[in-house]
Image (tube, rainbow, N blue to C red):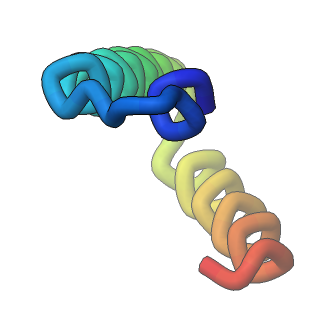
Amino acid sequence: MEILTAAQIDRAALEAHRARQMQLLTTVSERLTTAVADAADVLTPEQRVKAAERLASHMARFGH
C-alpha cells in the first residue's frame, strides 16, 4: 500500500514487490506439491482416492 499511496509511484519498487510475491507463491506451491506427493507415497491407492474425494469436496466449498 505504501508504494501505491506515495506521492510518486515507484514502478520499480512495485515490480520488485510483485516479483517477491510471485516467488512466495511459487515456494508455497512447490512445498505443497512435495507434501502431497510425500503423503501419497505412504497411502494405499484406495486411501488416495478417498483423500482426493475429500479434497475435492473441500475445494468445492470455496468455489474451486
Q: Nearer the viewer, residue 34 or 50?
A: 34
| Residue 57 as seen in the image, left or right of residue 33 | right
Q: In the visual, does 6 lie left or right of 21?
A: right
* Residue sitting farthest toward the left: 12
Q: Residue at x 59, y 61 (%)?
A: 52
The answer to whether residue 22 is visible is no
Quarter of the view holding residue 20: top left
Q: How many marks?
A: 0
Q: Position of residue 54 (x, y in %)?
A: 76, 63
Report the side of 39 relative to 13 (left or right): right
Does residue 11 appear to the left or right of 46 in the view shown?
A: left
Instruction: Tell me which corner region of the image, top left, top right, bottom left or bottom right, holds residue 62.
Output: bottom right
Visible residue check, residue 54: yes
Residue 41, horizontal then vertical, whole percent: 40, 22
Q: Which residue lies most toward the front here?
A: 7
Residue at x 38%, y 26% (from the top left corner): 21
Rendered location of residue 25, percent (x, y): 39, 29
Pick the residue in front: 33 or 11.
11
Q: Is residue 53 above or below residue 50?
A: below
Q: Quadrant of the N terminus?
A: top right
Question: Which of 4/24 is in front?
Answer: 4
Look at 68% across and 60% down and name the residue there: 55
Quarter of the figure that contains the C terminus:
bottom right
- Residue found at x 47% / y 49%: 45
In this picture, is 24 found above or below 18?
Answer: above
Residue 62 drawn above or below residue 42 = below
Whole-percent x and y of residue 30? 31, 22
